[in-house]
Amino acid sequence: MFIALTTIITSFFITAVLIVPFINFLYKLKFFKKKTAITSLNKNAAITHLKSKSRTPEGAGLLLIVVIIFLFLSFFALFYSVNGNITSNFPIVKEIGIIILISFGLLGLYDDIVKFFDLQQDRGFSGIKTKTKLLIQILLATAISSFMYFGLGINFINIPIFGIIYLGPIFIIFAALVIIIFSNAVNFTDGVDGLSMGILLICLFGYLIISISIIDTPLSTFIGIWIGTLVAFLYFNVYPANVFLGDVGSLSFGATLATIALLSGKVFIVFIFGLLFFVEFLSSFIQLSAKAIIKRPILPVAPIHYLFLKKGWKESQLTQRAWLATTILVIFGLFVSNI
């Protein structure tokens, strides 16, 4: 617990010092949010919302990733120099966390750059083509899940009440699917001031409790560092937002949340903790599938948070209620995980 609290405080102060000049740098670059295929699933709510954010820069996720990786390596260099005996369920779990952040972070960074410079367009919208992005995600997620299976020997899932179920090689497919779902889910949710990162922050507190309970120092250290950076970021991301995370952060953070769930042995709990993320993903997936198959939308709006904005909810109301709902979901998830 002491180590986790230390990492939270340290990462918070370091991020707080660095983020202001980084935001100013993004403003100088004019790295502003642009129209994408996802945010344009509803022409009224999404585009109106987009115009209100047209002068808010995105891309802060790059800074957070760098800080997390640097502090993670620094803390473990310090731990090994002071005491080489570190309790961990997986000796190289720290490498897994770094691989996730780098791989999906690079995908998101590339997408942000493509949008910024209008290098590619998908049906008139900025960013990497949807099919291309999905293919890259599948390849990255499969590589990560394969590393878990072959490198760490993880081949099971723990379902509350039913207990441990061994999947064998099927674990690779299952884990890759979870990673892809939550990578996109967090990405779809990002954009409304404080919404996605506030939900993620609360989810991480739940997994911090779980990682401490299973005495996995690398995992709890990583989560602690991540929590500290998010708290500092959220100060500038809550309404009215001064900066957005961008794809560089949202894609990697969603994938990393899924990976933490897999490494903790509590993967099904992430669907309770992150239920709002999952609902956002489902609404967007259904809408995109309908437009591709029957050439017309099924839902009135997607992602679903635009429905509440369309009904007249203020952004602050939407965010705060989502945070409260996630708090209850995390408490319930912790209860279920102990059954």
Image (cartoon, helix red, strand yellow):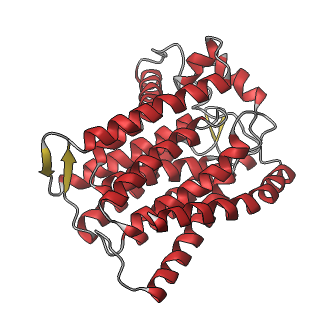
Task: Write down the quadrant of residue 211 in the picture.
Answer: bottom left
Task: Give the residue at the far right of this rendering.
Answer: 28
Q: Toward the viewer: 211 or 35?
A: 211
The residue located at (48%, 88%) in the rendering is 81
Q: Nearer the viewer, residue 2 or 27?
A: 2
Total tally of numbered discs in the picture? 0
Task: Please state which of residues 182 and 114 is positioned toward the viewer in this rendering.
Answer: 182
Residue drawn at the location 31% of the way across and 54% of the way down = 262
Using residue 285 as the reference point, say whether residue 318 is left or right of it.
right
* Residue at 52% from the left image edge and 13% from the top image edge: 300
Residue 123: quadrant of the picture: top right
Residue 235's spot in the image, x, y percent? Answer: 70, 45
Rendering coords of residue 209 (x, y %): 39, 52
Q: Is residue 113 positioned above or below 277 on the image? A: below
The residue nearer to you, when weighing 182 against 43, is 182
Residue 241 as seen in the image, left or right of residue 91: right
Against 179, residue 125 (above or below) is above
What residue is rendered at 33% in x and 42% in y? 334
Return the residue found at the far front: 2
Image position of 127 (left or right of 204):
right
* Residue 30 placement (x, y as % from top left): 83, 47
Question: From what the image shows, is residue 57 above or below residue 312?
Answer: below
Where's residue 314, x and y in %?
68, 20
Image quadrant containing the N terminus: bottom left
Image position of 140 with respect to 37: above or below? below
Tell me, yes or no, if residue 215 can be seen here. yes
Quarter of the image where the C terminus is located: top left
Residue 132 seen in this snapshot:
no
Q: Is residue 24 rendered to the left or right of residue 36?
A: right
